[in-house]
Image (cartoon, helix red, strand yellow):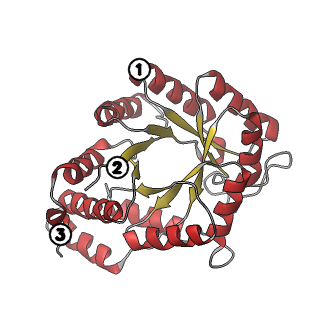
Amino acid sequence: MPLPNLSFEFFPPQGIQASCRLWEAVSELAPLDPDFVSVTFGAGGAQRDLTLDTVKAIKRHFNLVVAAHLTCCSATRAETLEVAESLSAAGVRELVALRGDPPNGTGTFRPHPDGFEDSCELITALAEMNKFSIRASAYPDPHPEAAAPGADVEWLKRKVDAGASSAITQFFFEAESYFRFRDACAAARIDVPIIPGILPIENWPRMKRFAKRCDVHVPAWLADAFETALRDDRHDLLAISVCTELCSDLLDGGVEDLHFYTLNKPHLTSEVIRAFRTAPTASLRYVA
């Protein structure tokens, strides 16, 4: 099995204990030689300064390529581009450009009166700066606000036409979801890399709530397996097995890059990578 290029997502810490967890996570995963790591932007842009500080610290202490998330929520165009300039001044050359989610509890996204209307407008403005390689988001399962079947492919095509040079997908749990989306993108002549986003299931009840909020499909077999594993105290063993099998299926299907949503908790991610790097394919299959 070919070894993939790896990347990891972290989020800015709030508080001393959270900072310790973040640095432990980066310390554990950095030796796996990722192509890049990304740092998220808080809902509604609430963590702009934390994102910038976290990016600077990771670059300084770990010498990794850092892709900073940038959203256009709750900010004017000038304010958003000022953040981009600050990131550029800090040595950031890669951005993950997103529309972003509104602050918790505020409902549907509404652009700032003087802000960017959507991620395509943001990507266009960032591309015109000519300072960044820009990654966009993609959705194998329909985005909660998708207007019709195929809308997510159309949106990704618009993002690429605006200047995105690659995309990272929302998490999903069956490789076929990714392959269907990849084939639809190829049919639409989208020719940039589409990197699968992988979420090791660190906490099943929390993940179910998160997936529901994001409209991510949770297969019945997965729900049944985790309910049984929780009763038998085998949650982490199942999480590693299921995630390893997903990665194995993706690699068998020609995927060359994997992006892990770590939630600043590196254990499951590192165990999954260790499993698919060292084990024969046949041993990776989960049997219910």
| x, y percent for residue 220 | 34, 80
User: Disc 1 to disc 2, how far (Cα)?
Assistant: 25 Å
| x, y percent for residue 118 | 74, 55
Q: Amino acid at mark 1?
A: His
Residue displayed at 40% across by 34% down: 18
Res 270 visible: yes
Secondary structure beneath dot 1 equals: helix
Q: Amino acid at mark 3?
A: Arg
| x, y percent for residue 49 | 61, 30
Q: Nearer the viewer, residue 179 or 148?
A: 179
Q: Which mark is residue 231?
A: 3
Q: Amino acid at mark 2?
A: Pro
Q: In the drawing, does residue 196 fall left or right of residue 138?
A: left
Nearest to viewer (mark 1 / mark 3):
1
Residue that mark 2 sits on? 4
Residue that mark 1 sits on? 61
Q: Nearer the viewer, residue 29 or 107?
A: 29
User: Disc 1 to disc 3, how far (Cα)?
Assistant: 42 Å
